[in-house]
Amino acid sequence: MVSPLDMAGFSVLLLLGLALFSPFMGRLRTLQTNLTFSLSALASLAAILAGAMTVAGGSVATATLSLGLPGLPFHLRLDPLAGFFFVVIGLLGLCVSIYSIGYVKGYSGRRPLTRMVVFYTLFLAGMFLVVLADDAYFFLVAWELMAAASYFLVMYEDEFAAHRRAAFLYLLIAHVGAIAILLAFGVIAGQSGQEGFEGYTFAAMRATHLSPGLATAAFFLAFFGFSAKAGIIPLHVWLPEAHPVAPSNISALMSGVMLKTSIYGIIRFAFDFIKVFPWWWGAIVLVLGLISAVMGVLYALMQHDLKRLLAYHSVENIGIILIGLGLAMIFASFHLPILAALALIACLYHTLNHAMFKGLLFMGAGAVLHATHERNMEEMGGLIHRLPWTAVLFLIGCVSISALPPFNGFVSEWLTFQAFLLSPALPHPLLKLLMPLGAALLALTGALAAACFVKVYGVTFLGQWRGHHKPEHIHEVGWSMRLGMLLAALVCFLLGILPTWVIGWLDTIPEQLCGGRLYESAGSLGWMWLTPIAQERASYSGPVVFLGICAVVLVTWLLLHIRASRVRRAPIWDCGFAKLTPRMQYTATAFSMPIRRVLGFLFAVREHSELVAPINHPAVPTHIQYRLRIRDRFWNWLYTPQSDAAYWIARQVGRLQQGQIRIYLLYSFITLIVLLVFL
Amino acid sequence: MTLHSLVIVLLQLVLLLALAPALSGWIKVVKCHAQGRTAPGIMQPYRDIRRLFIKDVVVAENASWLFRFTPYLVFGVTVMIGGIVPLISVDLPLAATADVIALVMLFGIIRFFTALAGMDIGTAFGGMGASREMTISSLAEPAMLMAIFTVSLANSSTSLTQMVSVMTRTEFVIRPSLAFALAAFILIALAETGRVPIDNPATHLELTMIHEAMILEYSGRHLALIEWAGMMKLMLFFALGIATFFPWGIAPAGDNILPMLALGLLIVKLMLGAMIMVLIETGLAKMRIFRIPEYLGSAFLLATLGMIAFFILE
């Protein structure tokens, strides 16, 4: 019997081996990509098995490698929390690896594929190692491996200045975050009372007892660091820059699972290292989650670049995950283990769900990009006729992310709502009163997300083709891309239909982290009925909803088709005016106009329209020019002042450099004098 | 699942399918009387649906499968919801399928696909209707859930049948939180079912259409399904209001005679509710589209007041 840790080790070693050996196959392009991505899929499969077994058994396995620093060898640990993230990364890794076989063919011959396959495998291996690491040093090595590999992948098409700029921004924010995480480790290790490097193992950190002040410092340093990676507002600005320019398979992985490693980090710090914390930590996490969710979806609504829009939706969904986490922290701080377990499961469930549907949507966006060479939604339309498979699979992604039953996004949002509604159990009057307002904001987020995906799907796949060139050259993507998306869609569906199984499987994680189990109550009526706390409180049944709707639809269809009836096809009714053209359709910008008007005060919107009249008389205009610019306010509020300040300081410091040897000698002389005086 | 509950759920579905057009007809009759017009008769919606079912379907050349699938889905989801909301008895085997939050999301499926179907043909009207519908619904949803939260906190459950049981079992007192929630619910229900002052179901004037703009391209049996589902949705919103705020009369589980009594009471309640709606519709004019956020904002405020009243007073 192979132990889960062995299997996890096999998975990582396979990926690292691929990174090492695939460059030697550079000549045989097809073999290189087919072999690398197939084996990456195999490695992901092994990781899924390893993680699933660990979570199901609630087992903890540790190992120490003979690599690393003297005195601090690499420690590995596979516990249920790490196992869960193994499954998340593995599931999407499997889908995306299969998808990539077809997707990278689009680059074949145009740019070197070796760079793609090497960094792809390193990126996956880095993510697996992040959750496997059991000491601060190894964790940061893995963290940097992941960051560096993804940086090179974002830079893949590096001849465009915008891509280089986006990658640099990403690297910058990732490193500011990494510094904060390093400091957080330092704070805990400094209090561990261990000699040498021993304090830097996670085992020592778990045993360390921190004073409240230092614990707060450690948690919020770590929270800041992980927020930078997760793209929590206001540290989200790199996401909408980096995701659109990265190849789509990479965007899927970055948005689907890389962001989740920071959720892993936050859970690890709060529930595993620090364990005892005041309620206001959870409240801050909750509030930041709410802000990210609402602002993320609103910014997403304003976009018309498909991948940029999806990137903003990642901000939104990370916000929803944080809402669950914040609730779990609040409940845990008041020693309500069952409620904390419910909120934590809602958070983890949404983590898994978001990985699947966002991966699916980014893969779908990649398929659209592959087929049309276009990212701007305003130039698309009617793709449902050209890409029938992609259209169906993308629709499943849209329904899932819009939190509509019976798909998976609904289940986790519904669990979050249930957690919100249990707030009267809290012994804090103000919290009781304010928590339902948070639930209302979550409802707003869900509804706006649905509006946004009606826009995405309606403008991209429905209606008529808006582009300038003829749509005849657009063809459905290859089988491997379809298979990758199909797998992700299938998982989305199963996660929505079988929530009780998933919760039963996840149950070991809250049991270890907050001492409460959910399955006894959640599955009390059998696998068909999800009853989070009690049957009388709330219940939901995915299978019944799905089968019920299917049954009624089928019966209605059969009843109406007993008698042979004809469907007549006719041109679109044009109200008797001149022929309708595709340019007369609603655009993405037009679709979101009412929301822009209602909630526009949250953005920096600049609208400008101008009549162009050839004989300079407004009565005979030839056309109207309309310009719209929407900017992220946080850019002006937070980043421009900082970059200005950094530039100003650099200029001031730069004055020291006079370029004359006498001045530099004077500096040395003064330094010597000062040192002599003080030492 | 006992035979009794199976009979109840079947009876309820038949009731919903059969009575929904009558309710719409009744609303039209009362409205005509209130506005001094001649009424078409309570049976007119039945005749309309029958005529549409007989007619051939005309579909635009570039319509996709989504356009043809949507009417069936809309109808299916509506009937599914009909099996969950208690009309005459709480003894529903399917009641545990979805609580109120899930019900709101099920209505969300209908809206999502109707809006998509509106955009499928690629006319300006469809897109306009979809855009407006999604905007209004995204502003209505927080208020809707806030009202529901207030009621569910008062009954410490989000399951509809449980809410009904708790309310009918406890002694009747006027609870300020529920009064606020009811006011909010009425405002939102008018918005969600597309009635005046948000939308006018009788208009086809391009500048004011919302729901009608999305389904403008439908004909024949497709239109019949959508119209019928729309009537059922209206009745279900009445039923939702009755079950959450005026549940007295809905039979408890395991009772054989009371459901018949409950049926009579339900019809009376529906007729009264419809008359109140007609009063509102006749008394108000349709709102400008950019006034709607204020309207929904006040609904949200009312629901929030209900919540605060619950925590402070109860």
Image (spheres, coloured by chain):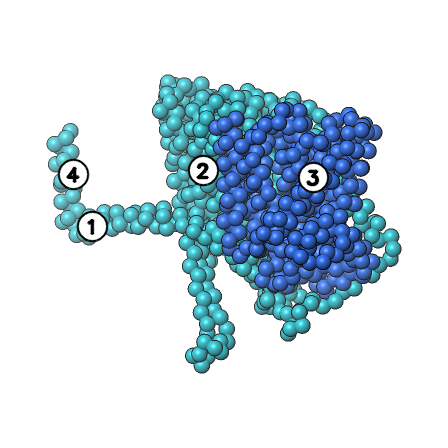
Callout 3 amino acid: Lys
Q: Are marks 4 and 2 on the same chain?
A: yes
Give B283 or B44, whichever is nearer the viewer: B283
- Considering every residue shown, the one lying at the far bottom of the view is A615
Q: Residue at x 52, y 33 (%)?
A: B307
Q: CA distance from mark 4 to mark 1?
A: 17 Å
The chain under label 1 reads A
Query: Which of the 4 image quadrants contains residue B77?
Result: top right
Residue B36 x %, y %: 67, 57
Residue A137 x %, y %: 43, 30
Chain coloured blue: which letter?
Answer: B
The chain under label 3 reads B
Q: Earlier in the sequence, mark 1 or mark 2?
A: 2
How many dots with numbers? 4
To which residue does mark 4 refer?
A: A671
Label 3 CA crowd tier, 10 Å (few <14, some 14–19, many 20+): some
To which residue does mark 3 refer?
A: B269
